[in-house]
């Protein structure tokens, strides 16, 4: 079984090569341009234009919507898992941890929400999943409030500088057996 690598934009090429990833989810503002790593297949790169906000946006800001969650779920379910999946946003702290958790629940609906939140917190003391994505996914995936409650229970992560990628192991892999990610 493989894993999900959560990364800031600045580290995606390095981490894609190191982990031999071929698929990636990007969550960035609509006009935020970047170069897709050559090892990521263009047809297996999901680009979602969404800002890191937790309220309905005004002006140029695009708040996470159900269509974004649906795209993450569909993409994750089509992931062949023969290589790790890269999920990134600008800093790798809010949108991408939420998306990684959503992908995990899409693949493993029987997973315990609290256990997933604890795996996230153990993997990253900095992650603060975007609560709008979490709440939409909770409803979309019919988690009955468990996912939202579990993420709220781990609280806000430590302050981050945007250079703390991590590996989110998929169940039933134990946290002790998760792959190392040297910075």
Image (cartoon, rainbow, N blue to C red):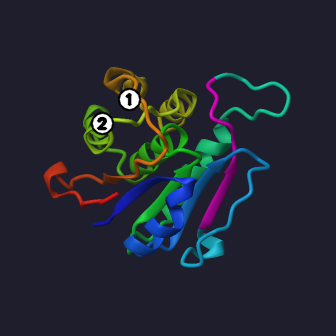
Q: Which residue occupies 60% across, 55% down?
A: 26
| Mark 1 element type | loop
Q: Quadrant of residue 36?
A: bottom right
Task: List x then y, in percent, for residue 63.
Answer: 70, 32
Which label belongs to residue 7? none
Residue 137 visible: yes
Please tell me the numbered disc located at residue 157: 1
Task: Give 109 or 161, whichever is nearer the viewer.
Answer: 161
CB-based contact (under 8 Å), mark 1 and mark 2: yes
Return the residue found at the far left. Answer: 176
Front one among 90 and 137: 90
Could you tell me residue 161's position as x and y percent?
Answer: 47, 39
Q: Which residues are magenta?
A: 45-54
Label 2: how many Cα within 10 Å (few below 14, some 14–19, many 20+): some
Can the viewer see residue 76? no
Mark whose residue sits in front, 1 or 2? 1
Say which residue appears at 77% left-offset and 47% top-offset: 30
- Which quarter of the figure is the N terminus placed in? bottom left
Q: Nearer the viewer, residue 72 or 130?
A: 130
Mark 1 Cα-neighbour bin, 10 Å: few <14, some 14–19, many ≥20: some
Residue 121 circle label = 2
């Amino acid at each position: 079984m493989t894993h999900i690598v959560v990364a800031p934009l600045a580290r995606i090429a390095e981490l894609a090569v190191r982990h031999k990833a071929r698929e990636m989810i990007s969550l960035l503002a609509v006009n935020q341009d970047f170069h897709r790593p050559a090892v990521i297949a263009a047809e297996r790169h999901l680009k979602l234009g969404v800002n890191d906000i937790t309220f309905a946006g005004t002006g140029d800001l695009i708040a996470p919507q159900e269509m974004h969650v649906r795209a993450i779920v569909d993409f994750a379910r089509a992931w062949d898992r023969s290589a790790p999946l890269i999920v990134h946003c600008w800093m790798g702290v809010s949108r991408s941890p939420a998306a990684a958790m959503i992908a995990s629940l899409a693949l493993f609906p029987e997973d315990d929400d609290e256990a997933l939140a604890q795996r996230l917190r153990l993997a990253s003391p900095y992650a603060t999943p975007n609560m709008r994505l979490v709440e939409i996914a909770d409803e979309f995936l019919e988690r009955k409030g468990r996912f939202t409650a579990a993420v709220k229970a781990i609280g806000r992560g430590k302050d981050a500088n945007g250079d703390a990628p991590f590996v989110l192991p998929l169940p039933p892999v134990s946290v002790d057996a998760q792959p190392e990610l040297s910075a």
